[in-house]
Image (cartoon, helix red, strand yellow):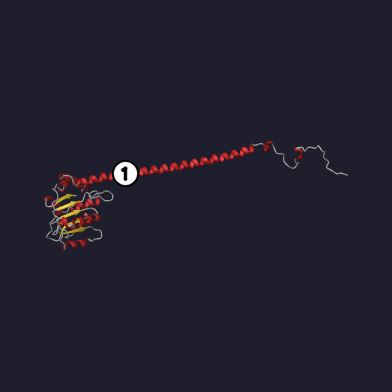
Amino acid sequence: MNRGDDLEDDFVIDELVALSDDEPVPDADFFSDDNENEDDGSAEEEVAAGDSEARTAVTDDEAALAKKRKRREKEKERKAKKRKLAEAVEVVHQSVAAQSPDQLSDFLASKQAKVFSNVTAIELEDMRIPANPMLTKRLGQKSKSTGAPTLLFITGAALRVADVTRVLKDKRLRGDKGGEVAKLFAKHFKLAEHVTYLRRTKVGAAVGTPGRLGKLLCETDGLTVSALSHIILDVSYQDSKKRTLLDIPETREEVFKTVLGGPKVMHAIKEGSIQVILF
């Protein structure tokens, strides 16, 4: 007996019937191309988002570079203005010493008025430094007495004192017979040491700060004005803050109160035996 299957020979499988009852029936979208399109859309969106982020990053970099460039330009402009102002100030201060004797006298009087702000105009006029002709050469002369220079050079900084001293020690200026050049400032030197040095040394010129020179003139007998003929005020030199000897309140006060304002010095200036020169 031939036992075949129970299906008829011309039986055709129905696709819907062939599916198992346990398997879910796919919907129409399963057989469509929409899923693929959605995936493609997501990929395109991701690419677009990446391009947008890249463009944003480039824009931020360009903005940062622009800011840096602008800062550099502003800094360059600021330095140029500062340099131009410094040059202008330097020219003004250098031109002071080139003025006429009467103008120099007025300049000193204006600085003097800042120190003696509480005195009357008449008293200020009595203390006024008179106009004097140009400095004559005195470095070649040596005083017969110790501690009695013919020239005082007053400047506001110890380093400047050292520089000027080296220049004045040049034999082309003081010759073979010129006296010693005294270097007088408080830094590294005690007042007593300077007094001892001046008492045993014949000096032709003394270079110093107003503070130390004022103390030597007013508080000791180490420095005398018996041979003094010229006092030079170093008004052209400027410190790191672009201030001169007479711009700094402390040094200005020492110049007019303890050096030029000393009784012996002021008396000699009034008589004309000591001339004040602006350098």
Helix, strand or loop at label 1? It is: helix
Is 141 left, or right, of 243 in this rendering? left
Seen in the image, is 47 located left or right of residue 149?
right
Q: Which amino acid does the dot numbered 1 rest on?
A: Ala
Which quadrant would residue 264 be assigned to in this image?
bottom left
Identity of the residue drawn at 41% across and 42% down: 67
Q: Nearer the viewer, residue 100 or 20?
A: 20
**Eyeballing the image, is 225 above or below 30?**
below
Towards the viewer: 147 or 85: 85
Against 47, residue 187 (above or below) is below
Seen at 63% across and 39% down, the residue is 36
Residue 85 placement (x, y as % from top left)? 28, 44
Q: Judge left or right: residue 226 versus residue 24.
A: left
Numbered marks: total: 1
Residue 11 placement (x, y as % from top left): 80, 37
Question: Is disc 1 surrounded by few (<14), some (14 to 19) or many (20+) residues within 10 Å?
Answer: few
Looking at the rendering, in which quadrant would you find the N terminus? top right
Q: Quadrant of residue 198?
A: bottom left
Q: Is residue 244 above or below residue 44?
A: below
Closest to the observer, 259 or 82: 82
Residue 277 can be seen, yes or no: yes
Residue 167: x and y, percent?
20, 55
Q: Position of residue 44 (x, y in %)?
A: 57, 39
Residue at the right extreme of this rendering:
1
Judging by the rendered image, the residue that carries numbered circle 1 is 80
- Report whether residue 258 is seen: no
